[in-house]
Image (tube, grey):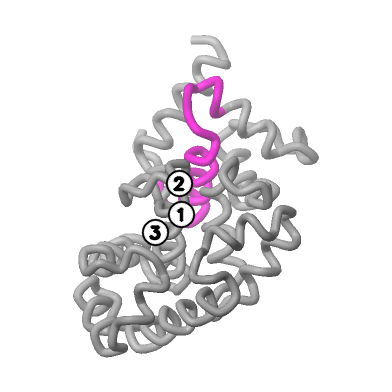
Amino acid sequence: MSGATSSSATVRGLIRDVGGRYSTEMGIDVTAGDAQVERWFVAATLFGTRIAARVAQRAYAELYGAGINRITDAASRAWSDLVALLDAGGYGRYDYRTATRLQDLARVVLERYGGEVAQIGRRYVTPDALVAALDALPGWGPVTIRLFLRELRGVWPGAALPLDPRALEAARRLGLVGDAHFEGDALGRITDIARRAGCDERDLEAALVRVSLGRRPTR
């Protein structure tokens, strides 16, 4: 097996074993329009807390099943109803705080962006401006922003962030890139590796971040 073939097999196996984009796992296709990006915004908000990904996914499923398809839907729900939905998804440790955050976000998105998350992506088309706008949202910080934008590469112009350093370190540990090579264009190298394997580069970056967080490929 050639080096390129071996690398492609490693990439496909990695994504299969540890998972790729969270949005895809949750049935959200951010390339399919603004409504799907709205869903991902709600989900990313839940991932921003120090809680297991599976719990965030379950909590999102409860919110979505109750008709909260976009963040502004939280504005019309009683705070206690949001708490109950989060509890049903196993989000009990952060239920009160997160219910408040959801309603605060709904208010800010209504006031600043006319209730449309997509307006953020249209208004701020450079990475620095977009990151600053998201960082100004209630409860959003670097972890949530990086997760949210990683899966919006190619969808929002400003979502062109550098490769997550955790992904680069995992790629080096797995032998996908050399120790010192491609430092300046790490994202380009990861993109090339992913496409040679017939995969989406966002899935590969997400998988590599998962490895850095402790997920182990099964081999």
Could you tell me if the residues under marks 3 and 2 are in contact, i.e. CB atoms within 8 Å? no
Q: Which residue is mark 2?
A: 33
Side (left or right) of 12 relative to 135: left
**Distance between the alpha carbons at the discs numbered 3 and 1:** 5 Å
Label located before the other in sequence (3 or 2)? 2
| Residue at image location 52% in from the left, 58% down from the top | 148
Q: Name the kind of residue labelled 1 in the image.
A: Val
| Residue at image location 23% in from the left, 79% down from the top | 87
Q: What label sits on residue 37 in the rendered view?
A: 1
| Residue at image location 38% in from the left, 81% down from the top | 75
The percent coordinates of residue 171 (x first, y second) are 59, 39
Residue range (magenta): 194-216
Side (left or right) of 94 relative to 33: left
Q: Name the kind of residue labelled 2 in the image.
A: Gly
Side (left or right) of 137 relative to 24: right
Question: Toward the viewer: 137 or 146?
Answer: 137
The percent coordinates of residue 174 (x first, y second) are 55, 36
Q: Which residue is mark 3?
A: 39
